[in-house]
Image (spheres, coloured by chain):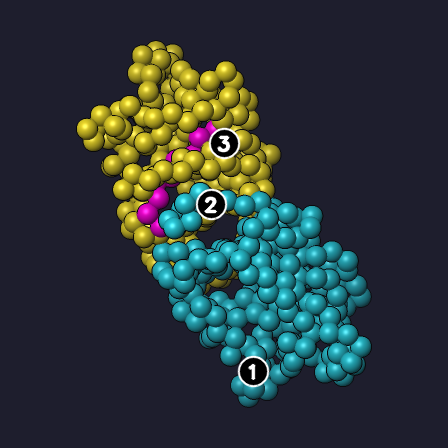
Chain colours: A cyan, B yellow
Amino acid sequence: MTDQTKDVPFSFGIDVSNATLEHYDNHIKRHLSEMAGQYQDQEVYDALLTQEDVLLYEVYETQRPEVAGELLNGLSVVHPGKIGDEYFMTKGHFHAVLETAEVYYCLKGEGVMVMETPEGDWVVEEMRPGRVLCVPPRWAHRSVNTSANEDLVFFFVYPGHSGHDYGAIEKTGFRKLVVERDGKPVIIDNPRWHASRG
Amino acid sequence: MTDQTKDVPFSFGIDVSNATLEHYDNHIKRHLSEMAGQYQDQEVYDALLTQEDVLLYEVYETQRPEVAGELLNGLSVVHPGKIGDEYFMTKGHFHAVLETAEVYYCLKGEGVMVMETPEGDWVVEEMRPGRVLCVPPRWAHRSVNTSANEDLVFFFVYPGHSGHDYGAIEKTGFRKLVVERDGKPVIIDNPRWHASRG
């Protein structure tokens, strides 16, 4: 990679124990304040926010042209914690170009991927180190860290032309929530999701 | 993944120590006899072939529709060994749709990826466990196992519409060869590549 004017192959290490990439172009940090309306327990959310704008998750991205044929990739790190009984999670989104897939390789931690289609189908898949998760086109995706004390760390790859559509999710959230009951993660209906479509 | 009629998300483990996937649709095995003309030392190649049609490498694939927006992925396993002083390697190819990328995550072993463009640019990148390799569109790619006794194992992802073009590579090979000199991998010119374009 000596000639920077050419579009040449390049490689970089994933530092799993420190949950970062050896090389990256963007580092996105999502704090509690950026998740307004996403957590069920509004009182706890507001109370926590007056104390500290906690860092919920981070994304390290390698920049590539956002066109078909290219592959965007990077590392997601969801920190452990809860807002009430609801685990720390990513905002989640559809791809703007709905007919685009995503592939994940989980490197560390314990969690789930919550997914749904615009038609209302839903799936929740476990994420464990050493596992690949294939998300076909049309499925919105949100990762949830269900560990009490460990980061959820995974590598992602998606088509360059996918884009992001947060709009639908920001309005009503995902159809399913992942909450802690008796120390274990449980999938429950999101009452707000139903209401919005009622 | 209970309803098989729907195109739903799914996950599977990568068994790194046994170099296989927990779930796969295709298992491709490439033997010495399928690499005719690819190794420099034709005499050694012929002699070895009379003894045993050695298994050089294996690919485990998860089947997905071969269209833009989809992501094809799987596991490559290049076994250790040499034909003369040239290491075991994959056949290598361009993508039929030249403007498509590929992303690798190396899980085990020691090796290199040999890459070149139709214009004659070339790059050789090291592959080590925990490293990501990004191959931009237009670059042919061949993996080479430079370890004396360990498999080279890596996970790959590429766009669904990429296709494969082995033609150009089968005729003249890659521009560069990776051979052992004094116990170490060294990059040398492929004399046959020059001759074919002379």
Rendering coords of residue B79 (x, y %): 48, 27
Rendering coords of residue B100 (x, y %): 35, 52
Vertical relation: B155 (above or below) B175: below
Vertical relation: B153 (above or below) A113: above
Q: Can residue B125 be seen in this view?
A: yes
Alpha carbon separation for disc pair 3 and 1 = 48 Å
- Which sits earlier in the primary sequence, circle 2 or circle 1? 2
Secondary structure under the numbered disc 1 in the rendered image: helix
Residues packed near mark 1 inside 10 Å, few (<14), some (14 to 19) or many (20 plus): few
Taking A155 as reference, is A41 left or right? right
Residue type at the position of mark 3: Gly
Question: Which residue does the numbered mark 3 point to in the structure image?
Answer: B111
Viewer-side label of 2, 3? 2
Rendering coords of residue B6 (x, y %): 44, 63
Residues packed near mark 2 inside 10 Å, few (<14), some (14 to 19) or many (20 plus): some
Q: Give the range drawn in magenta.
A: B135-145
Q: Tell me the residue at 72%/83% (across/down).
A: A42
Vertical relation: B82 (above or below) A26: above
Question: Which residue does the numbered mark 1 point to in the structure image?
Answer: A171
Alpha carbon separation for disc pair 2 and 3 = 15 Å
Taking A105 as reference, is B89 left or right? left
Q: Is residue B32 magenta?
A: no
Residue type at the position of mark 1: Lys
Q: Main secondary structure of the magenta part?
A: strand
Indicate the quadrant where residue A183 lies: bottom right
Taking B112 as reference, is A44 left or right? right
